[in-house]
Image: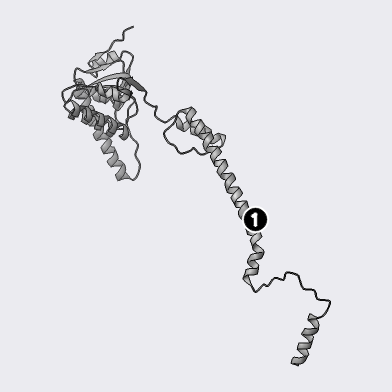
Amino acid sequence: MAASSASLCSSIHTSNSFQRTPNPVNYCNPNSLLLKKQPLEQKYSLHLQSKVKNNQQQRLFNVKATTGLREINGDFSSSAPWPSPSISADQGHNSIRAAKGNPPLMPAIRTSGGFVDLMSVLLRSRTIFLGQYVNSQVAQQVISQLVTLAAIDPDADILMYLNCPGGSLYSVMAIYDCMSWIKPKVGTVCFGVAASHGALLLAGGEKGMRYAMPNCRIMIHQPQGGMGGDVLAVSRQVNELCSNRDKIDKMYAAFTGQPLEIIKIYTDRDRFFSAGEALDFGLIDGILETEY
């Protein structure tokens, strides 16, 4: 049996019908497989290198382009390149609308020591501007300015210009408490409007130092607020709102010298005053006449 198998294999190898390949591949030898795959890997590696190089060139082009745009706009705040824009027209309109809420940049003033921002110049003259809705952030800024000026010179007066439509009652109370606590006298001047709790700051200035421009408007009313929840939660919020109203009415009575009953009538609804009416009512002490 073994002899017959050997003769069969010998006849197959010597037969003319079987042709061996000139470079046979031994699939049991891993080195031969690697040799076969090497040209493909080299080709793929060259393709990756070319793609990376093209991406680097494209990135370099984007950096140069955006850097030039930044230099035109005059923004040198960061050396990192801007990403290339990839937003739709609607998103672009929304971003423009959102940019309107950003606070304006304060202009700089040239002095002998160089450029100084306008806020620093005003603080040097002991002047504070409050021209927006009062929230916790605005209150913190105003309080920090008041405390700083009081620490620099506790005997010099401070002047606060108001063009305030109102704000959070607690934030306004924080500013008023600071005005009353520091040693310097704080005078107030109304430009434009002092409405809602902004009128409380105007009337809360130092007696004899509360002024208004001829065309300004002043409005006082009772505190307002929304509430929700169960009966107990709503009742507590109502009690807090009523307590705040009583406190504000007593403050206006002390500022103006009017009876508390008159103050409650005036603050029951929105009550607008001209500069002359506010002077007669006792909210201010004088009107600053403009010179033409």
**Residue 191 appears anywhere in the view:** yes
Residue at x 34% of width, y 29% of height: 133
Residue at x 29% of width, y 39% of height: 237
**Quadrant that contains the N terminus:** bottom right
Q: Is residue 229 or residue 2 the one in the foreground?
A: 2
**Residue 269 appears anywhere in the view:** no
Outermost residue to the top:
292
Q: Amino acid at mark 1?
A: Lys
In which image quadrant can residue 120 be found? top left
Can you give x and y, in whole percent of width and height, for residue 80 in the image?
Answer: 46, 39
Horizontal arrangement in the rendering, residue 191 relative to residue 157 (left or right): right
Identify the element where label 1 is drawn: helix
In which image quadrant can residue 244 be found? top left
**Does residue 242 sit above or below 276 in this rendering?**
below
In which image quadrant can residue 162 be found? top left
Can you give x and y, in whole percent of width and height, for residue 104 in the image?
Answer: 40, 27
Which residue is disc 1 drawn over?
Answer: 43
Residue at x 32% of width, y 30% of height: 134
Q: Is residue 113 or residue 157 the one in the foreground?
A: 113
Can you give x and y, in whole percent of width and height, for residue 176 in the image?
Answer: 23, 29
Circle count: 1
